[in-house]
Amino acid sequence: MNTSAAPGDDPAKKRKTSTPPEGYVCNVCNTAGHWIQQCPNKKRSSKRQKSNHVPVAGVDPSQTDIEEAREMQKITPPRCFCRIPSRLKKVKRSKEGGESSRAIGKYFFFCSKGKRDRSKCRFARPVEDEMKPKMERLCAFFRQDW
């Protein structure tokens, strides 16, 4: 195996390359002597292409929503009644409350077992509870606002 780098490249970032077998022809430039991955004529595209998407208010999340979600993901998830870490989800619809439920659009921690798992517990805790210090949290049973 050869180690080769283009002039001006950092020597710490040298790539190990090997010469292809006799008769191998690059499919990009139709010449022998190098692999297709090392082809000098291969177009180098950026990993992420720029989007021309225009944000729509009320449909797309705002920058503050994105920052809030990033902060919520830093919270260590509480353990559910099954004694496994719960998962963070946004409530999209409610079985009991219907479309008028106060939970729609809010983030909750739910049991992380699958929908059809019969051993799944009914754990659900609002994220706001996890953001408060432990001494300030009030058990859901004693809350007056529910």
Image: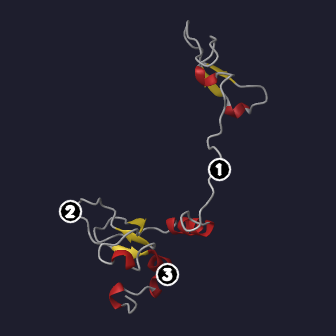
Three-letter residue code for mark 3: Lys
Q: Amino acid at mark 2?
A: Arg
The residue sitting at 74% across, 33% down in the picture is 10
Image coordinates of residue 132 in percent, x first then y, are: 49, 81
Which residue is labeled 3 in the image?
A: 132
Which of the 4 quarters of the picture holds residue 54? bottom right
Residue of label 1: 52
Q: Nearer the viewer, mark 1 or mark 3?
A: 1
Earlier along the polypeptide chain: callout 1 or callout 2? 1
Residue furthest to the left in view is 118
For the residues labelled 1 and 2, the Cα–Cα distance comes to: 45 Å
Furthest residue toward right: 8
Identified at 41% across, 72% down, the residue is 108
The N terminus lies in which quarter of the figure? Answer: top right
43 to 27, vertically: above or below: below
Quadrant holding the C terminus: bottom left
Residue denoted by label 2: 118
